[in-house]
Image: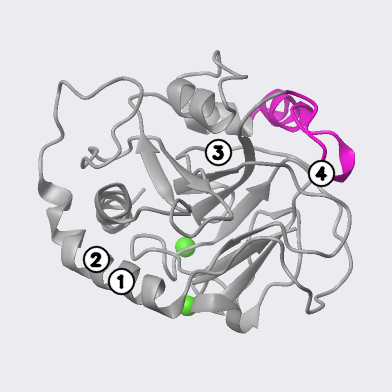
Amino acid sequence: MTDEDEKAFDEFVAARSTALPHTAVLVCGASQHDAANRSSEVDRPMRSLALSTAVVSTMVALSVALAPAAGAAPSPSASPAGRTGQTPPAGKPCVTHLTTDPSTNGRVSCYDTFTEAIADATGGRITDAPRDGASAVADPAFGRRINALAQANGRPAAQASEFVIGIEYVHANYDGGYLIFAAGAPCDDDNEVEWRLPYLDSGFNDKISSFESYSDCEANHYEHFEYGGSSTGWRGHTSYIGSAMNDQTSSIEWR
Ligand SMILES: [Ca+2]
Ligand SMILES: [Ca+2]
């Protein structure tokens, strides 16, 4: 990760963990999984709720206002269960929890290790993931374990409260800073959107270059907030998002 990427990542985490009361589980790390591309983009109703304009405006304002706080020192006595509301040091694995309730969507929890973050993002079902996120996500076995928590067609295979639905990377080839998103249920095999992130925070806005999806999800990446502008189309994963959308993503949907 370049210094600039690290700074942007720090700012993102600081803004999320301090200010934003909502969105998916976001963990910082890397991985592989093969999800077949489904059909092309179609407008569809969504199960999850879009954030209101007022809420999004507040999120934007808070992100801008709080970004400079990235330099603040984290509390050394933070609970190992999470650091929500604090400023984690660079590289701390964080989880952003997506829900269908705008009042809770986007809650962020940061941890000392990838192991702890994955335990959170899987609702406590996977508690022995490696400490090193990059090597874990590059391991196909890790992806299989994550996906095994979800059965086909949106049904959970395990009684987990959350499922990892995707990881977004700042660089191509699943490299650089990353965000792991977790949600309350897997995706299914129809075209209805399950989970949405209408506003990608400043640390990751216009920076995404590769992504991986899990739990039967595929993702669509949009150029602007609230799913506007150009888009990548629905894809399970890609090591490079393409020149047209590289460093352009501002909102994401999963189905
Ligand atoms: Ca990038
Ligand atoms: Ca954009």
**Magenta segment, which residues?**
139-158
Pointer 1: what residue? 58
Task: Name the residue beneath numbered marker 3.
Answer: 30
- The residue shown at (60%, 19%) is 126
Near-viewer residue (225 or 207): 225
Query: Circle 2 is placed at which residue position?
Result: 62
> Which amino acid type is marked by label 3?
Ala
Question: Which label number is shown at residue 154?
Answer: 4
For residue 77, which numbered disc appears in the image?
none
Q: Which residue is drawn at 25% across and 72% down?
A: 61
Q: CA–CA distance between discs 4 and 1?
A: 32 Å
- In this rendering, the answer to whether 214 lies above or below 22 is above
Q: Residue 2, percent across and down?
A: 32, 52
Label 2 sits on what residue type? Leu
| Residue at point 59%, 75% (across, down) | 222
- State whether residue 78 is above or below residue 70: above
Quarter placement of the C terminus? bottom right
Spot occupied by residue 219 in the image (x, y as percentages of width and height): 69, 60
Whichever of callouts 4 and 1 sits on the residue coming sooner in the sequence is: 1
Inter-mark Cα distance, 3 to 2: 28 Å
Ligand 2 contact, mark 4 (Cβ < 8 Å): no
Give the amino acid at mark 4.
Gly
Circles 2 and 1: CB atoms closer than 8 Å: yes
Q: Earlier in the sequence, mark 3 or mark 1?
A: 3
Q: Earlier in the sequence, mark 3 or mark 2?
A: 3
Is residue 225 positioned above or below 96 on the image? Answer: below
